[in-house]
Image (cartoon, rainbow, N blue to C red):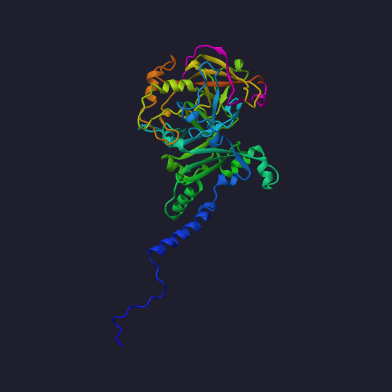
Amino acid sequence: MDDQGSVPLRSGPAIDAAGLFLLLITLAVFLLPIFLLFPPTPPSRSDAILQTHSRLGLQDSEKSGLASSPGSGPRQPKGAQATIQSLFIYPVKSCKGIELKRSKVLPTGLEFDRLFTFAQLKSPFPLGLDSSEAEQTRHEWEFITQRQFPLLATVQVDIYLPDISKSRATGVGSIAPSSDAFLILRFPWQEAGLRGTLAWVGAKFARGRNALPEKEVMLPVAFPSEDEIKQRDYKYEDVKIWKDTITALNLETELPRELRLYLGVSNRLGIFRIDPARLRQVHRCAPTKADAGYQPVTGFQDAYPLHLLNLSSVRDFSDKVEKDAILKTLDPRRFRANILIDGADAYDEENWKTICFKPGPRTSRRENSKFHVSCRTVRCKLPNVDPDTGYRHPVEPDRSLRKFRDVDEGAKLKGCLGMQMTPLFDKSDSPDDMESWVEVGMPVEVLERGTHIYLKQ
C-alpha cells in the first residue's frame, strides 16, 4: 500500500499555545510562594545577626519625616519653646546616618558617631626632578568624603546591639557582652552572570520591586583587642583628616574590592577606626580645659564633637535657594547634623553660647544635658550631594550659602548654617562620669548668649 500521503504519527499529546501558557501559570503560582519564603540567595549577615541582636535606630514608621521634608513637616507654633525634633548619628563618616529617639552624650559627641572614616592611600604628585627617593616612595592615608566620592551617601550603615530577649528566645545561652555590637555596611552591587541574576531576583522578592542586590561588610563596633588586631591583620597607621594627622586602626582587610569599584576610588581604600586612646584634641573656639573641666576631644568629626541645626533657619534659607528639576526641596539631611531643633526663630541659634536640654513632658530621661555652643558651621560643597541618590548638584545649595549666608567675620566669602557644639558635664573628674543624654522632645533653654567669630584651623 502506498503511504506517501499519510499523516505522520505523533509520539505524544500535542501542547498548543494555550496549554503552554496554562503550564507556565501553574508553575509560577507554585514557585512564587517558594521564592517568597526562600529567596534564591543565601541569607545575609544582617539577616543572621537579627537572631541575637536588634538594629539601633528608629523604624521607618517611627521616623520624624521632618528631616526629609522641612517645608511639609509639623512646625512648632510661633513663640513656642524650641525642642529637639530629630537626632542623627553617622557611625561612618560621610555615609548614611541613623535616626534615633534618644542618645547618650560622651565627650566625643553622640555615642557611636563618626567612629570610622574611609581613607585612600595617596602619593605626592607632581614630584620635582630633584625629589629624593624618600619623597618619591612616600604615601599617606587621607580621609575621603562625599566631596570627592558622592556615592558614599548611598552606603547604608546599621549598628546591631545584643538583645537579651532574643538570645533567651533562641536558646543561645549566655548573653553576648556589649562589646559584641556590630556595624554592617551595605552597598548596591550585582555580579555578572547567573549568580548576579539570581541575586537581582532574590532582592526583588525579599525587599520589593525597587530593591537591588547588595554586598555587606561587617565590622566590630568596640575597639578590637590586641589579639583580635593580630588575628584580623589590622594595622595602626597614620591618617590625615583636614590638617590633623592621627594614628588610627586600619581595618582595610575587611573591605571587598567591589566597594572601591562602586565608589570610584582608584587608589587603595582603607577604613579607619578611631582609637579611644588617640582622640583629637579640640581647641580654637571650644572651651578650654580649665573652663570645661576636661580637654575637649573628638573622633572623626570635622572639627567639633556635635553639630546642631535649627529647622527654622533651614526653612528660611531654603526659600532663598533657586530650585530646579534636580533640587526640588532642600533636605536638612544634606547638612548632616546630630541634633535638629524646631521652634526657635530663624538664626537665633547664632547668638547662643551655652544651652541646656531639659526633660520634657513626654521624654523618658529626667536629667539635663548641657553644651557649649562653640562656633558657626562653615559649609563646604558637601550639601550639594543628595543624601538618597548620591547625585551632586552642580551649584546648589553652595552658591546660595555663599551669597546669603556670608555672615561670619572669621570665614569671609564662606556660607554658614548650623552650630558646632562641645558637651559640658557636671562631673568631669573621671571619664566614666562624663556622660549625659539627649532625647527627641527635650526643650532647649538658652543659658548664655553672645557673638561668634570663627577661628580657622
Front residue of this view, candidates 87 and 105: 87
Magenta span of residues:
429-457
x, y percentage for residue 351? 51, 14
| Left or right, residue 356 beside residue 244 | right
x, y percentage for residue 311? 49, 23
x, y percentage for residue 233? 56, 43
Examine the rendered structure and indicate whether residue 434 appears above or below residue 350.
below
The answer to whether any part of residue 377 appears in the image is: no
Q: Quadrant of residue 194?
A: bottom left
Q: Looking at this rendering, what residue extends furthest in the bottom direction?
A: 1
Q: Quadrant of residue 167?
A: top right
Tell me how many marks there are.
0
Q: Looking at this rendering, what residue extends furthest in the top direction?
A: 450
Examine the rendered structure and indicate whether residue 120 appears above or below residue 66.
below
Front residue of this view, candidates 108 and 159: 159
Front residue of this view, candidates 296 and 309: 309
| Residue 456 magenta | yes
| Residue shown at 58% from the left, 24% from the top | 441
x, y percentage for residue 119? 47, 35
